[in-house]
Image: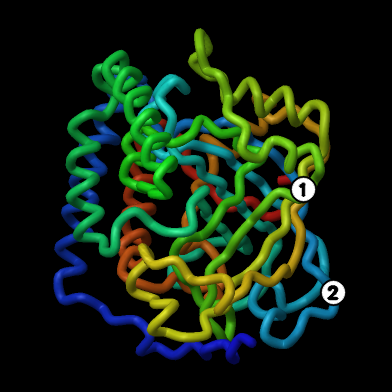
Amino acid sequence: MTSSPIRYRADVEVVQPNESDVIRDLNSSFDVILERTAEDYDHGVRSVHAKSHGIMAGTLTIDPDLSSELAQGVFASAGTHAVFIRLSTNAGDLLPDAISLPRGMAIKVLDVDGDRLPGAEGRTQDFILVNAPVFQAKTAEKFLGNLKLLAKTTDRIEGTKTVVSAALRGVRHALEAVGVESPAVNTLGGAPNSEPLGETYYSATPFRYGEYIAKFRVRPLAPAQVALTGQEIDPKGRRNAIREEVRAQMQGMAAEWEFAVQLCRDLDRQPVEDPTVVWDESEAPFQRVGTIRAERQDSWEPQLVRQVNEEMRFSIWTGLAAHQPLGNINRARRETYRHSADFRARINACPYHEPSGAAD
């Protein structure tokens, strides 16, 4: 039997004295990536998750009759919201898909009312997820060390990266054979070359959930998607194999995902300040609060790709105060996401904006 969820209070966060210094250094490292890729591509791209594999329009339908614990923030009232969905991989350069990396899913929910987070424009709520339940680093300072290494290899020696990725996939298979998972191996290029539409995505880091604290999960529901779970894409001879596969799949099926929340029930066992800890589902189960649906469509339709890839930014700090990002990693993401988006808008002479409705 699970315990009652922990109510949010300000002291669940512990701010480190060096956070502003780390954020400054993160921005400097991201600048290396942003400037190098802008020079190479003659175009500004995102400092992380630069490469898109699918852009879709859809809806989020919030379940009716949710319990008081689940009817919070965006999910306080039943109804349907338009959404934009972006599928990606995590590198800051536009690598060939033979270099296999973790997947990401960004969701922008439109026409959301409520008190906003500081600096959050418009009436949207962003959710940014990855296909792993935990974050790769415990603190922003530790993530900075990893980022400095990645910055040095950004958009360089693609052939070597491809060979290294193949070797790391072999390492991953060997580790899995003895029951070991390695987020580090996945991040460096050893991740399975998985079908994005069959993957389950997690917030990895915690957030306010109205009166409570939670992590988020989005997993496939449509039978055609579930059939893709665990399948891998063969990228041989195709630089954009993932994009091609997602496009072919979406032209033949409607996609549907369950949106669920995992309420924190023990701050020691489900910590706020350490996103490398898995929250045990037997102690803190995921509970469904809605569904996301994308009808059959061209997931690489040029106008929508431009609208979402070039004219929008995604940030966990765009949204309601009821879904305030929590923890050291999330606090660092606030300024770094803005920094990256501002660079891209300036280089491309294309200001980003928050859409105001499904037809915008």
Q: Nearer the viewer, residue 44 or 70?
A: 70
Left or right: residue 186 versus residue 301 is left
Q: Nearer the viewer, residue 292 or 303?
A: 292
Coloring applied to the structure: rainbow
Identify the mark at residue 304; answer none if there is no mark. none
Circle 1 residue: 256
The secondary structure type at the circle numbered 2 is loop
- Looking at the rendered structure, the kind of residue marked 2 is Pro
Question: Is residue 182 placed above or below 290 in the rendered structure?
Answer: above
Q: Nearer the viewer, mark 2 or mark 1?
A: 1
- Looking at the rendered structure, the kind of residue marked 1 is Glu
Q: Residue at x 48, y 52 (%)?
A: 132
The secondary structure type at the circle numbered 1 is strand
Left or right: residue 240 versus residue 179 is right
Q: Position of residue 148 (x, y in %)?
A: 18, 43
Q: Residue at x 69, y 30 (%)?
A: 299
Q: Is residue 228 visible?
A: yes
Q: Residue at x 41, y 31 (%)?
A: 348
Identify the mark at residue 64; answer none if there is no mark. 2
Left or right: residue 332 versus residue 142 is right
